[in-house]
Image (cartoon, helix red, strand yellow):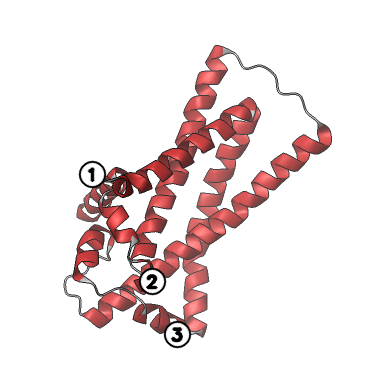
Amino acid sequence: MGGEDTILDLFFFIELSWGILLMVNSGLYGVLFYAGGLVSTGYIAWQSTNWVVSTLLSKNEVLLTWVATHMTTDPSTLAVLAPFLPSTPVLTKAFLGIEMARQVLHTLAFTAIMMAVFSLFLVTSLLTDALWDRPKPVATVGEFVYILGVGGTASLYVVLVSGLLFVNLASIQNFTALAVLVHHSLLEHWLAWTVTWLHAN
């Protein structure tokens, strides 16, 4: 297995490690603030994405058609992405392109809203730390374990969102090279298994 085969998992590992370090360095209250921010932004993004996309598409159906024309039709790429594609009994190429485009727009909107709202949390936290120059108390062993657990869980959530983003980007013609990386990624295979299980249940 070449180095390029594991580059996506390496990226996920770096992303996870950076998130955990950020959380651990922020202290007990900081990790609760960041974790609460991620939960809040995820909820806000989940609740608002459908409205944003439906409003956008209802006013501009051309956008959906344009995105659909840029969806990949390469069989090998579609085979890799099959677990993540909309589960419908019969799919023509045209209908598959429309459904893939709709899914990509939902994922991009969700990620953009989540990043925008969480950036507000992050900037607010950094500004308050800089303005008030609050000291960071030394965490006890119990607190450190708690910080590590909460920080790791929150960072893993971000990694999973990134994984879904890469999958959806890979379905666009200009980004189909990502499909090879997705195919060799252990995390993406785990995500595919999870999505398949959720569809089956």
Q: In front: 16, or 43?
A: 16
Quick check: marks 1 and 3 in contact, CB under 8 Å? no
> For the N terminus, which image quadrant?
top left
Q: Amino acid at mark 2?
A: Asn
- The circle drawn on residue 50 is none
Label 1 or label 3, whichever comes before in sequence order: 1
The answer to whether residue 104 is left or right of residue 94 is right
Q: In front: 161, or 21?
A: 21
Q: How many neighbours does mark 2 have within 10 angstroms: few (below 14), some (14-19), or many (20 or more)?
A: few
Mark closer to the observer (1, 3): 1
Q: In the image, residue 35 lies at what x, y percent?
A: 55, 38
Question: Looking at the image, which residue is at 32% across and 49% down?
Answer: 4
Local secondary structure at mark 1:
loop
Q: In the image, residue 134 lies at what x, y percent?
A: 78, 28
Whole-angstrom CA distance, mark 1 to mark 2, is 25 Å
Q: Say which residue label 1 marks.
A: 1
Q: Amino acid at mark 3?
A: Glu
Mark closer to the observer (3, 2): 2
Q: Say which residue label 2 marks.
A: 174
Whole-angstrom CA distance, mark 1 to mark 3, is 43 Å
Residue 113 placement: quadrant: bottom right
Q: Amino acid at mark 1?
A: Met
Q: Say which residue label 3 marks.
A: 61
Q: In front: 101, or 71?
A: 71
Question: Looking at the image, which residue is at 23% across and 59% down?
Answer: 80
Local secondary structure at mark 3:
helix
Q: In the image, residue 31 lies at what x, y percent?
A: 59, 32
The answer to whether residue 198 is left or right of residue 90 is right
Q: Is residue 106 above or below residue 19?
A: below
